[in-house]
């Protein structure tokens, strides 16, 4: 049946459904959606309407052009419309995220920061599951879902608390019995054994950024602090020993009682009177008073420094940040000293505070270094006195900086624009190793009126990119969408021997699912691209900047292939780009910048936004851009985008190109260098090829001449009636005689073969072959199971395996092999050598082994 | 790469169904019967797809294999001889939300039920059909069936059968609007599983011919089929039945066959020397009669009456 007929036939039946709805609507005034099936995950589709007159198309285009110029549609875009790529996310129950995230408490071979999904995958890969399919492994999504629910209810918690809870819930849900139940509980035991018993689980929320930051802080400072504590203890002890020895140099130490005290043990075994007579009267050379005083001072500083070790960081928190939500900063950063910072105080004040905070560490590390010199007796006052008087944090080694306090500012990025920017500039210019965590909360696509400091929709100030101009700085711009990357960025920033500016995105949304989708979209549409700049001196040029954690970093806009149904053809697809325009369409404030256009007006001048942005101004004349959107019923629409939003897209694209250039993608200079290198290579290759060819030609010419000479010689010989073979001998004319060695070998072979066979037979006799079943080929016919349920069992896929070969006789194994309709039971060799009729059974088993 | 994940959506149902949830009773087939393997594989498919037993129906006719619905803890209909197809079509036509399976044998389908079979193919409703073909009437103790080889000795043909057999694959491919035709064998469970799975995933009438051994009444044939590996050929194609490399290696011969090529599919089906395993033909665009069946599903009697009245009013004076 032709398609047209089918569709009209289909309409015949469907029309009555519509009629019912219409009738009910008229009669009862109810919503006309009665009887329509619930929308689930339906493939987006396009259904062409009827053709219309050219006049109507012209009228529609007139309206469309007016809209495009002004960006003021008659009514705002319905919230039911969503960018086509986001359609599946809005119709599913669960969104697969990288959350919950597990942050290790101690060092673990599984890693420091993993999504729970990755952690479970790691654990599953270490479990002994054999070939069978595992219900536990298949239930991973369910476990993640349960963990999410648990975290939503209980907040951040430890893996040790969550795991038993969710596994119990899973067991209760599955209610597995019999063999499946036993296998499942064995698998759970294995899983618990493999998973670590430490670490916390965090879910996606506006706290996630800080949880990850705290995790990175702990992991960076933990080992450094332990090392520092050990070093201080060692130095103190050694210095005290030094002083003790010095005290013993006192002539009074010659007194027998003093000697006895100094020994402390075995005093009954020695004659200290006699020992005193052996000690010289004048004593050893003694330390100068200056040195003694210096060492005593160093010990005092080291002892006082123990208090410093209680806190890993001094954190200044912008008082306006989450002021309404009362985040419990003390609980978030339990090992840090929390201070409040107000934008009114300015950032210059922080420089002073930093100097105050770092001062005890300057004293500590100065004392440490003096101690090390003293212990080696290398301290030279004429050189070192001056050095240590002027010892500041700038003299710290990289290791010392990690061991000192972390000076951290957590700030709303809006407080870094305007007058505060000069203070920030001073801080960074002076190279203070301060770590700034700036949080971008209001977004360009959402509410610019709240954040005029960031510029306008058409011209945004990029704070992250501005930081690049300080050169010796670590800059990371990212969001908690990718928790592992963010964690690594935090760690790198905290351990950098330089200032670090970490710029993170936070969507302050109560609706977690919505926030996650929006945050993903922001990264996708290049509004807040992720990048890292390692401006630290010493990094090779060109390797400092990277943008690889963005989706499809090599292109302008990420493009996805979308399976769609066009006029009933289920196999069609569309390549759809996700642009800044798609992101802006999610914001109801921009609703009048988007206009759905009926399909009869989809002419060749109506082009996708990503293509439009590639056109020159001349080429774009008369054209209008659109984005693909779906409505609630999954029908695809082309939605026109206004000129102001198109300009905003250009601006975002421009910034994206700036980042691409910096990272070497589509960089003019890089491309030129690559083109030049390719041209050089091609030239060299061509020259080489030419040389080989000319050489080859020369050789061919030479051979030709030689052969011509030989031919002439042969010809001459024939003509002179001489045998040419006597004149020209070639290898092909030599007869090859095969020596009759092979026959000698053959003659000797049977004897050797016989010996080998006897040896093999002897070895075979002593071999033990384990019985087994080719489980994958089992047809579940019950033949073996019915013979011995302890020996043969079904796995979770109802396929047989040998559970316990010793649970029955060898006879049962052989008989099972014989009746198995697919001959997949291999009885092996008998376990019990005393079983009756073994000789016969072994013979019967042989064909199955 | 981070950003939007187009595969970010997945659903978690409230209940997990295990094999036990799909099984019922003890299968009373002879030891070594191929029906066991089909039963297990079908239950595994239901588990993988997590089909709700309350939304799944198995319909069968008469014969050994037609006992199948008794061993499934789903809805079932063990009906009249040769009438599995009309019942299944009726169920699907009015309840398109149900997963409908037909289990039929060589007698049930190709003999008494042949008329219903042909029209069911043509209707192309979204039904998964498994023809369990052991080439003999086993339940009634060895009489030839329409698919028995020429010369088969049975109680009704003591000197051997004299009429050539029906080839179910060839027959199905010859009917208008056939949309999915595949062949597998019970002694290769992995291939059978993938075939049944592909059939279930196809939207339309999925006809799966399962060559099956009857170790009691066709013991010789079973031995011959399983031992002669040269007689089997695996149909290998990216759009065909996908099996793992290990399973593909169990076949000595392979042939690349595009399942959209109906002409070649028919040629292969007619080849009497080789048994081809895999997907012969698939057409996802073949019209489905069940799509026209239940558009007014869910309406009450009053609502239907309202429609009828409105319709009659159009012709009223």
Image (tube, rainbow, N blue to C red):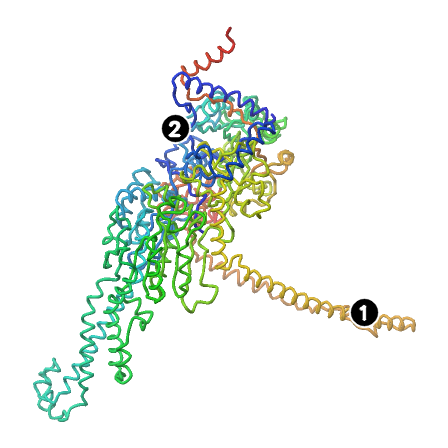
- Front-most of residues B4 and B258: B4
Q: Quadrant of residue A241?
A: bottom left
* Residue wearing tag 1: A704
The chain letter under disc 1 is A
Secondary structure type for disc 1: helix
- Front-most of residues A559 and A316: A316
Residue B181 in view here: no
Secondary structure type for disc 2: helix
Q: Which residue is located at x 51 percent, y 47 percent?
A: B246
Task: Specify whether disc 2 shares its chain with disc 1.
Answer: no
Residue A111: image x %, image y %?
Answer: 35, 57
Q: Quadrant of residue B280?
A: top right
Label number found at residue A296:
none
Q: Report the label total.
A: 2
The chain letter under disc 2 is B
- Front-most of residues A705 and A25: A25
Residue A397: image x %, image y %?
Answer: 32, 72
Residue A505 in view here: yes
* Label 1 CA crowd tier, 10 Å (few <14, some 14–19, many 20+): few
Measure how far apart labels 2 and 1 are at the Cα level: 88 Å
| Lateral position of residue A724 relative to residue A413, left or right | right
* Label 2 CA crowd tier, 10 Å (few <14, some 14–19, many 20+): few
Work out whether A45 lies above or below A723: above
Work out whether A298 lies above or below A343: below
- Front-most of residues A318 and A794: A318
Residue B40: image x %, image y %?
Answer: 44, 36
Check whether the beta carbons of the residues at disc 2 and disc 1 lie within 8 A of each other.
no
| Lateral position of residue A448 relative to residue A7, left or right | left
Residue B85: image x %, image y %?
Answer: 51, 23
* Residue wearing tag 2: B54
């Amino acid at each position: 049946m032709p398609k047209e007929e089918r569709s009209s036939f289909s309409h015949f039946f469907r029309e009555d459904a519509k009629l019912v709805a219409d009738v009910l609507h008229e009669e009862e005034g109810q919503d006309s959606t009665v009887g329509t099936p619930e929308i689930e995950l339906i493939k987006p589709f396009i259904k062409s309407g009827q053709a219309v007159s050219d006049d109507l198309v012209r009228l529609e285009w007139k309206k469309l052009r007016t809209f495009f110029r002004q960006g003021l549609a008659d009514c705002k875009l319905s919230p039911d419309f969503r960018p086509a790529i986001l359609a599946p996310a809005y119709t599913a129950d669960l969104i697969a995220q990288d959350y919950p995230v597990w942050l290790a408490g101690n060092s673990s071979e599984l890693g420091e920061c993993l999504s729970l999904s990755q952690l479970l995958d790691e654990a599953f890969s270490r479990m002994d599951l054999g070939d069978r399919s595992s219900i536990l492994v298949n239930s991973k999504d369910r476990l993640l879902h349960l963990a999410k629910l648990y975290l939503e209810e209980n907040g951040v918690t430890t893996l040790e608390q969550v795991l038993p809870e969710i596994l119990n819930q899973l067991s209760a849900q599955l209610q597995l019995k019999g063999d499946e139940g036993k296998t499942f509980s064995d698998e759970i035991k294995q899983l618990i054994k493999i998973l670590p018993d430490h670490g916390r689980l965090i879910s996606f929320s506006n706290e996630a950024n800080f949880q990850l930051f705290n995790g990175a802080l702990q992991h960076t400072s933990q080992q450094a602090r332990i090392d520092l504590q050990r070093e201080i203890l060692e130095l103190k002890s050694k210095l005290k020993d030094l002083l003790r020895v010095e005290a013993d140099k006192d002539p009074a130490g010659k007194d027998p009682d003093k000697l006895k005290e100094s020994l402390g043990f075995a005093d009954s075994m020695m004659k200290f009177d006699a020992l005193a007579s052996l000690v010289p009267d004048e004593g050893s050379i003694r330390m100068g008073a200056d040195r003694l005083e210096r060492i005593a001072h160093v010990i005092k500083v080291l002892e006082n420094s123990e208090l410093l070790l209680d806190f890993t960081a001094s954190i200044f928190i912008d008082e306006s940040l989450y002021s309404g939500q009362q985040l419990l900063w003390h609980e978030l950063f339990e090992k840090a000293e929390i201070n409040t910072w107000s934008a009114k105080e300015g950032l210059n004040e922080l420089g002073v505070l930093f100097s105050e905070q770092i001062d005890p560490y300057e004293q500590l590390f100065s004392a440490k270094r003096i101690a090390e010199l003293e212990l080696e007796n290398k301290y030279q006052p004429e050189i070192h006195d001056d050095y240590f008087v002027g010892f500041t944090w700038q003299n710290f080694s990289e290791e010392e900086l990690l061991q000192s306090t972390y000076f951290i500012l957590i700030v709303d990025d809006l407080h870094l624009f305007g007058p505060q920017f000069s203070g920030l500039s001073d801080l960074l210019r002076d190279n203070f190793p301060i770590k700034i965590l700036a949080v971008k909360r209001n977004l360009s696509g959402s509410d610019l009126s709240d954040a005029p400091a960031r510029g306008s929709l058409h011209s945004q100030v990029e704070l992250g990119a501005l930081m690049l101009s300080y050169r010796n700085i670590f800059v990371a711009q990212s969001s908690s969408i990718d928790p592992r990357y963010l964690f690594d960025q935090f760690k790198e920033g905290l351990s950098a021997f330089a200032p670090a500016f970490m710029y993170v995105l936070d969507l302050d949304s109560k609706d977690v699912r919505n926030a996650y989708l929006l945050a993903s979209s922001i990264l996708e549409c290049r509004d807040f691209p992720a990048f890292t700049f390692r401006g630290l001196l010493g990094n090779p040029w060109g390797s400092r900047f990277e943008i690889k954690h963005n989706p499809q970093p090599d292109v302008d806009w990420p493009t996805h292939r979308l399976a769609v149904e066009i006029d009933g053809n289920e196999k069609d697809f569309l390549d759809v780009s996700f642009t800044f325009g798609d992101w802006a369409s999610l914001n109801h404030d921009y609703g009048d910048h988007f206009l759905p256009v009926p399909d009869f007006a989809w002419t060749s001048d109506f082009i996708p936004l990503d293509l439009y942005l590639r056109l020159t101004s001349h080429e774009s004349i008369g054209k209008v851009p659109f984005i693909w959107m779906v409505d609630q019923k999954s029908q695809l629409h082309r939605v026109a985008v206004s000129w102001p939003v198109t300009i905003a897209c250009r601006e975002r694209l421009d910034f994206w190109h700036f980042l691409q250039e910096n990272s070497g993608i589509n960089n003019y200079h890089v491309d030129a260098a690559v083109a030049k290198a390719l041209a050089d290579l091609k030239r060299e290759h061509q020259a080489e090829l030419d040389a080989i060819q000319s050489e080859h030609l020369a050789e061919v010419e030479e051979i030709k001449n030689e052969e011509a000479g030989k031919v002439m010689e042969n010809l001459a010989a024939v003509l002179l009636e001489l045998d040419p073979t006597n004149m020209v001998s070639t290898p092909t004319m030599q007869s090859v005689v095969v020596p009759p060695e092979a026959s000698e070998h053959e003659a000797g072979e049977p004897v050797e073969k016989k010996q080998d066979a006897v040896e093999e037979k002897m070895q075979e006799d002593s071999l033990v072959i384990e019985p087994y079943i080719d489980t994958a080929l089992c047809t579940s016919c019950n033949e073996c199971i019915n013979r011995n349920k302890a020996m043969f069992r079904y796995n979770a896929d109802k396929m047989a395996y040998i559970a316990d070969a010793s649970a029955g006789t060898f006879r049962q194994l052989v008989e099972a092999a014989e009746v198995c309709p697919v001959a997949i039971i291999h009885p092996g060799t008998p376990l019990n050598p005393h079983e009756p009729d073994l000789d016969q059974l072994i013979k019967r088993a042989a064909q199955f082994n | 790469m981070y950003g939007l994940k187009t595969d970010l959506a997945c659903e978690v149902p409230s209940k997990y169904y295990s094999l036990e949830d799909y099984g019922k009773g003890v299968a009373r087939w002879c030891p070594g019967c191929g029906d066991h393997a089909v039963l297990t594989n079908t239950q595994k498919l239901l588990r993988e797809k997590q089909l709700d037993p309350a939304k799944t129906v198995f319909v069968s006719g008469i014969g050994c294999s037609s006992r199948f619905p008794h061993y499934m803890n789903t809805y079932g209909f063990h009906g009249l001889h040769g009438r599995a197809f009309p019942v299944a079509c009726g169920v699907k036509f009015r309840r398109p939300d149900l997963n409908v399976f037909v289990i039929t044998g060589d007698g049930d389908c190709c003999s008494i039920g042949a008329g219903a079979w042909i029209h069911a193919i043509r209707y192309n409703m979204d039904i998964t059909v498994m023809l369990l073909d052991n080439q003999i009437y086993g339940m009634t103790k060895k009489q030839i069936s329409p698919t028995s080889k020429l010369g088969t000795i049975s109680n009704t043909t003591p000197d051997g059968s004299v009429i050539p057999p029906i080839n179910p694959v060839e027959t199905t491919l010859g009917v208008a609007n056939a949309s999915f035709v595949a062949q597998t064998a019970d002694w290769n469970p992995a291939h059978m599983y993938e075939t049944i799975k592909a059939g279930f995933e196809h939207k339309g009438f999925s006809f799966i011919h399962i060559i099956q051994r009857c170790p009691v009444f066709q013991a010789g044939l079973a031995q011959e089929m399983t031992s002669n590996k040269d007689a089997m050929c695996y149909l290998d194609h990216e759009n065909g039945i996908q099996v793992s490399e290990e399973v593909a290696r169990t076949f000595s011969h392979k042939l690349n066959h595009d399942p959209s090529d109906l002409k070649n599919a028919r040629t292969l089906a007619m080849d009497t020397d080789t048994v081809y395993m895999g997907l012969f033909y698939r057409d996802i665009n073949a019209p489905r009669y069940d799509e026209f069946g239940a558009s007014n599903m869910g309406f009450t009697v009053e609502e239907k009456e309202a429609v009828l009245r409105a319709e009659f009013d159009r012709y009223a004076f």
